[in-house]
Image (cartoon, rainbow, N blue to C red):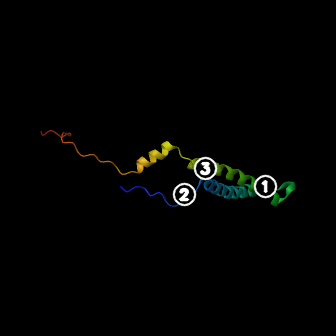
Amino acid sequence: MPPMPANRGPQGPSTVDKLKMGAMMGGTVGVIIGFIFGTVNIFRYGAGANGIMRTLGQYMLASGATFGFFMSIGSVIRTDASPIAVEAFARAQRRPFIMAQRSDAYRPRNQ
């Protein structure tokens, strides 16, 4: 087997990149959920003294910020692997080791 090259080429995204990606995805989903939830609440209970746009914006901002925060933390935790898990994954991905058959292996009896 040839030795591994010193420069392995481009790596995957860094932890900060994954944090930003999780925040963007979570923020987008949170804003959409906030829009739906805010619209339903405005239809049911009215906008109140703040008006429709401000109330809807508060729902969207609060939901987007909360969901984005937790999604970014979750994406970092998910990608932060322990050395034990990395080693187990590497062992599972390697080629199987096949042993030669022994001559005194089990043989069925002739009946």
Give me the C-alpha separation between circle 2 and circle 1.
36 Å
In terms of image quadrants, where is residue 106?
top left
Task: Tell me where residue 71 appears, x and y as whole percent.
Answer: 64, 51
Q: Position of residue 46 (x, y in %)?
A: 82, 55
Residue, x 53% and y 61% (percent of image)? 10
Q: Position of residue 66 (x, y in %)?
A: 71, 50
Tag 3: amino acid: Val
Residue drawn at (54%, 46%) of the image? 81
> CB of mark 3 within 8 Å of CB of mark 2?
no
Disc marking residue 84 = none
Q: Give the amino acid type for the residue marked by disc 1 in the picture.
A: Gln
- The kind of residue on which mark 2 rests is Gly
- In the image, is residue 34 above or below residue 85? below
Look at 65% across and 56% down and name the residue there: 20
Say which element carries label 2. Answer: loop
List the residue tagged with mark 3.
76
Looking at the image, is mark 3 or mark 2 nearer the viewer?
A: 2
On screen, residue 28 versus residue 81, left or right, reads right
Residue 9 on image: x %, y %: 50, 61
In front of the other: 65 or 18: 18
Look at 57% across and 57% down and name the residue there: 13
Residue placed furthest toward the front: 6
Disc on the earlier residue, 3 or 1: 1
* Residue that mark 2 sits on: 12
Q: Quadrant of residue 28?
A: bottom right
Q: Which residue is mark 1?
A: 58
2 and 1 marks in contact (CB < 8 Å): no
